[in-house]
Structure formats: structure tokens, C-alpha cells
Amino acid sequence: MDLSRRDALAALAATGVAGVAGATFLDGEDGATAAAGDSTSSDDTATASDDGLAILVAVAETVYPAAAEGVDTFVETYVSGLPDDRQDDVFAVAADLDATARDWEDAPLADLGRSTRDRLLRDLGVDVADPDPDGYLSERIRFHLVNELLYAFYASPTGGRLVGIENPIAYPGGTESYQRASMATEDTDG
Amino acid sequence: MAEDRSPSPPVDVCIVGAGPAGAIVAARLAEAGHDVVVLDAGPRFDLDDRTEQLDAHVRPGVDSAARSAADNRPAAGDGLWDMGGERDAYTSSGPKGYPLNAARVKGIGGSTLHWQGMVMRLHERDFELHTRHGVGVDWPIDYADLRPYYAEAERELGVAGADDNPFAPPREEPFPLPAFPPSHSDAIFADACESLGLPTHSVPNARNSEPYDGASACVGYGTCKPVCPSGAKYTAERHVARAEAAGARVIDRAPVQRLDHGPDGERIEAAVYATPDGEEFRQAARTVVLACGGVENVRLLLLSDSDAHPDGLANSSGLVGRYFMDHCFAGVGGRVDRPTRQNHVGFNTTECHALYDAEDPLPGVKLEFLNYAGPSPVIEALHADDWGDSLLDSLRDSYGTHLAVGGLVEQYPHAENRITLDPSTRDDHGNPVPDVRWSVGPETRTAIERTNEVQRAILEELGAEVDWVVGPDETGPAYHHMGTTRMGTDPTESVVDPDCRAHDCDNLWIAGSSVFPTGGAMNPTLTIAALACRLADRLDDWL
């Protein structure tokens, strides 16, 4: 299951990023991709810290299903498209999590195996924490990292498809899909 | 620079409330050349914030109220529309609790900011319930009186619909927009309903199936209630914009404290309102239109008591606040062994009105086939205590095979269901808050039970495993506040006359569902809009 740059842009639309939100990802319509792409320039991408990005990809690879592929590009596109203040929060909490990994596991988070990262997050109580942007570390990790990345994934058509819905809530996927008896093929569906 | 909230020179019309009733009256009268000022207790919400509100709705932990405060809007309470807090304090003393602040929005656009957008006409029987069945009360007008205004209201709201409902009252012209096509789950229901003698049909929606009135067609965000980021769902902000374009002045965050009358007590002279900086002003007007909902209309009349009107303004009948009605929800849901494709959109596309005019049960009932039964995977994922493959397995297990039949059930008017003032609790201006006394009568309980039987039969016809029922003990209100300033010809038995003018005050008019003598079981906003169009015509003539 390949995550695409288009999926990341769709998730940005769902989360209300200016310039992306309001774009209609109608079935088989590529124009929306171009319109949405206007908001994420190469300059924006350059602002994403490589270290920070590696931490986010490591978290994403932990909380996404194992079948997800293309996670690094997907995460980079999504995070680069976030507004600056939201992006800053994400990278700040990623740094806090990485510091915890170095403290507890003597290694950067990105160097840990998937099962170790999973255990670290659960030991921090992130799985049962209430998402709170200004809360304790576990609550901030849940809000700024885990839920941000899960939202990007399951509000995108490709993530939704894994569950059986190509037009998930918050994704402006038009008014055709609800009429269908089954999911359309990916190349004709947003 | 602070917004100027000082009063205008005396105007033709002062309208209290910028929801659909007030906004439609304002637009029509301003376009007819009258000087209009609209006062609303709530803020003007920025259209550019709608996608952020969607984000706050879907993502737990996003605090929209805090963001509102940062934007210098009043942080009155929680939720997307800032309801709650001292401004909106209330009590609920009836046998059944009433969640008032979930049921309304104060602000430019009123409760259409968070509504579902379902717009049906009342049936002929709703206007003559007492004559036909010996229950409730007749309206002083009939369906034929309102019929042309229903057509106007459908154009005003941009209703998408089809003339395919065999139970609907007669209509004279097509809907302005084509109906939204039925969903996949509608098709599943249709066969089962047909075999049970329950024909299904489309739902009139105040939601653009194609671009209309300068607004986008629906793009399928799926979050109609509580927020539509695309603007495809009608909100009364459209009529506020029209009113302002025609010269009306709309003042937000200006809660009216009382209406002042002249020495003889027969005419209102001004609306006294407060502003955020603590000042109090008088907006003088030739006429006043109350349009702030079935609860606040009552409170303002009662707060305006005087020597001439010791029991409150326009209350010589003693009926202001009485006969409070809502629609009661009844529903049955379950799962089937095939895909049902739910939660793509946030509105319904099929209903059944076969029970509405029948006599088993006698209270009106309409059935709704939900397009959003069961959980949404993205929302469930954000609340889960798991991730990775096990989360995916859990989402796959919980999504995809849910079905649900909801419905609205009529309440008859009962005098003991009422809105009063509770002087033991005060709002942010020191005024007594509204007390809601609401109960579900025996005839409605019986009708809900009968509705559940039909709903269960439909699901059993589909071989569904029923896993929830909302019956008479679990029922709750549909947030339709009706009946508290009822319309009638006899001043001892009603508050306003058939033109919606107060019996006791020559220049006081009341718009909205508080004038409904009975409420049927149809969502009330189309009738609110039709009555607003009619009131505007009458008031234009009077002016």
C-alpha cells in the first residue's frame, strides 16, 4: 500500500491548511493536486529539519500499519505543508521524544527498531494519554506526533481505503463515493 | 479600532436575532427600502475559520474556544461555536433534562451555523390537528396560506430536492436544485421498506447539489453538523450579507436586555442592548421583530415587564413561554453482513413519510435512513488506545457494515412544558436565566415505541443484528424549539395573531418557530423561513 504525495496533500486539505483547504478532490480530477501543490514549495520543504523528519518518520512507521510504504515522502510532504507554528510544535515535541529515547535507550529514536519504538511510546503512556497540545510529555506526543500522523494517514484516501472508505470524514472527496456499492479503483478515485 | 456598536438614528425596523428568521426578514425589508438594524447577542464568526473549526471537531485536543479568544472573540464557553459560560447560563427543572446550549448557537447566522440542513414542508394535517383528530390545536392559517411562501423559502434557502415523495403536500413548482442522489445504503433500505409497505423517497436539503447563490456545491467533507467548511450548506449568513448589501446594519455581540414601550404600553419604542465594553444603548425603531429563538424570545418578553405589562410584554394571555415543544428522536441501529458505505457525507438522502399522516401512531412520525451510522475510522483512530496493525484490525472490524433508521416523533403542545425565568441564577449582565421545563408525554412515548417497532422490522427484514435502540426512555430532543409564543386569533389563547404580530403591542412582531401552535414532526426551518417571508410582506405593508 503506497502512500503518495497526493495523499499527503489531501490530508493537509482535511486539516484546514490555507491554500489546500477547500480544494475539491473530485474523482479522477488532477487539477486539485496542482492547486493544492501550490502551498508546498521546495522552500517549505527545505525548512523541515532532517533530524526532526527522521524522528517523525520513525514515529509514523510505528503507528502506521506495517503494509504502509512511501512513509518518508508522505510524512515529509505533510509536515512541510503544515503552518509554521504547527510545524514548530511538531518538531519541538519530536525533539523531546528523541531526547527521551537517547536517555532511556541510549540511541536516537530513528535508530531503534520498530518494536523498541513501540514499547518506548507505550512505556511513556502515549497510547492511553489524552491528546493535549500543552500537556505532559505523553499528552503532547499523543497530540503533536501520534494523532497528527494518524490523522494524516486515515484522513487520506489511501489510508481510508485500508479500512474500506476512500472518502473519509474531513477529506473533501466529492459526492460520488457515497452512492457507490464498493470502492472505485484507485486510478479513478481521489 | 473597536467596532462602532452605538445605535443608529431611529430606524423603521429593529430585529433582535440574526438567525434564519431574523436574517430573512432583514434582507427582504432592507431590499424593500426600509431602514433596518439587527442586534445579535453572539459574535460574527469568520468564514475563513471554518476549516479550522472542522479540524477542532475531528481532532481531539484542538481547543477552538481558546483560538476564538486569541482572535478577540468572546471565549464564552466550549465547543466550535463558543456556546456556554455565564452568557448562556440556563437551568433545566423538568422531568427530562434539556441540554440547551448544545441545541442553539448565538451569533450571526444563529443555529444554522451548526444545523443539519433538512428542510421539509409541514403537511396539511399539521395545521388542523385539533379539527382532524381532537388533539393539540389548529393553526389560524392553513397549508394553502403558507404554500406560496414555502416555495419562496425553498428559493431563499436553495433547497435541493425532488418531487418524488408520495406523502408530501401539494407543491406548485420544482425545487430550485436537483436532489442529492440516494446513497448505497438507501438502496439497501429501499427494497426492505418496499416489502413492508413503506415507500422511500428523497430528502429536501438546504445544501447545494450544484453551485447556487454564490456558494459552492457540496464537496463531501462529511462534517455538515457541526460545521460545513465549503459553504455549500445554507447558513443565515447568506441573508445577513444580503441585508447588509441592501443597507441594513448588523451589530454583533449586542445582547438585548429589554424592550422599552411608550407611556400607553401599546407600542415598543426601543430595544435596550449591551455592548462588550460595558455600555448600554437604546436602538429606537418604529417596529421591533423578535427573532432570537423559542427560548430567548420568551426570556426577552419576560425581562421586559413593566407597570403596563406586569407579567411580561405581550403576555396578557399568560401564555408566553408555555407549550414548549421539540421533536423526539427514535432510532434503531445494527449491523448487516455486507458493506454499507457509511460516513462519506454528513447528510441524509432518503426518508419515509408513510407514517406521518396515518393514525398508528397518531403523533406525526418521519423515518430517516442515516448515511452516517456507526463510527468514522479517522475519528475512531484518534481516540483509540492502540496503533499500527492492531489499530487497523480494530478499525476494519468496527467500520463498514452499520445501518441505522432514525426518526422524529411529534410532541403535542402541553402547557406545563414551558420556559420561565430562574431568578436564582443570573447571566453575565445580571439577568435571570431561562429555565427549561420539558417532558415527554404518554402519547409521544407510545408513538416512539411504535416507531421503534417499525424501525426494528426494517432492520430485521435486512437480516441485521440490532445493537442499539433509542426508545421512550432514551429519547432526546432534536433541538427544535417551538410553541412558546403561539399564534392564534384569540388574544386570551395565543400571543401573536395570524400575521405574527403580538396581540398586546401594535408594533411588536415575532419571527421563528416560537409562533408554531403545533410542531408536527418535520424539521422546522423551512416553515420558519416561510413564515419569515410572510411576516416581511405583512410588515412591509404595515410600514
Image (cartoon, coloured by chain):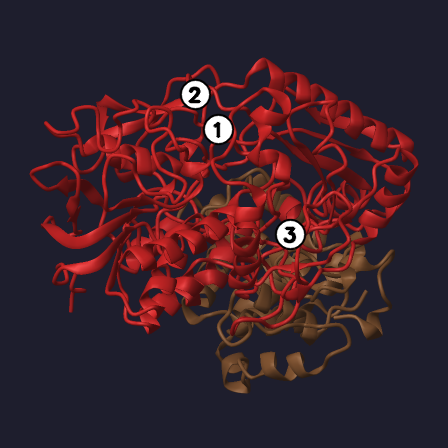
- Residue type highlighted by circle 1: Met
Residue B187 is situated, as x and y percent measured from the top left of the image, at 86, 49
Where B238 falls versus B264 (above or below)? Answer: below
Q: Quadrant of residue A182?
A: bottom right
Residue in the foreground of this view, choosing between B299 and B252: B299
Q: Is residue A59 visible?
A: no
Mark 3: few/some/many CA within 10 Å (<14, 14-19, 20+): many
Residue B140 is situated, as x and y percent measured from the top left of the image, at 47, 36
Spot the red chain and give its letter.
B
Whole-Å distance between the Cαs marked 2 and 3? 32 Å
Q: Chain of mark 3?
A: B
- Residue type highlighted by circle 2: Asn
Q: Element type at marker 1?
A: loop
Residue in the foreground of this view, choosing between A66 and B331: B331
Residue A185 is situated, as x and y percent measured from the top left of the image, at 87, 68
Spot the brown chain and give its letter.
A
Which label lies toward us, 3 or 1? Answer: 1
Question: How many discs appear?
Answer: 3
- Residue type highlighted by circle 3: Gly
Mark 2: few/some/many CA within 10 Å (<14, 14-19, 20+): many
Name the residue beneath numbered marker 2. B417
Contact, mark 2 vs mark 1 (Cβ under 8 Å): yes
Name which residue lies at 44% across and 56% down. B533
Relative to residue B100, is residue A160 drawn left or right? right
Residue in the foreground of this view, choosing between B485 and B541: B541
Q: Quadrant of residue B68?
A: bottom left
Name the residue beneath numbered marker 1. B325
The numbered mark, 3 or 1, whose residue comes first in the sequence reads 1
Which of the image's four quarters has the C terminus of chain B?
Answer: bottom left
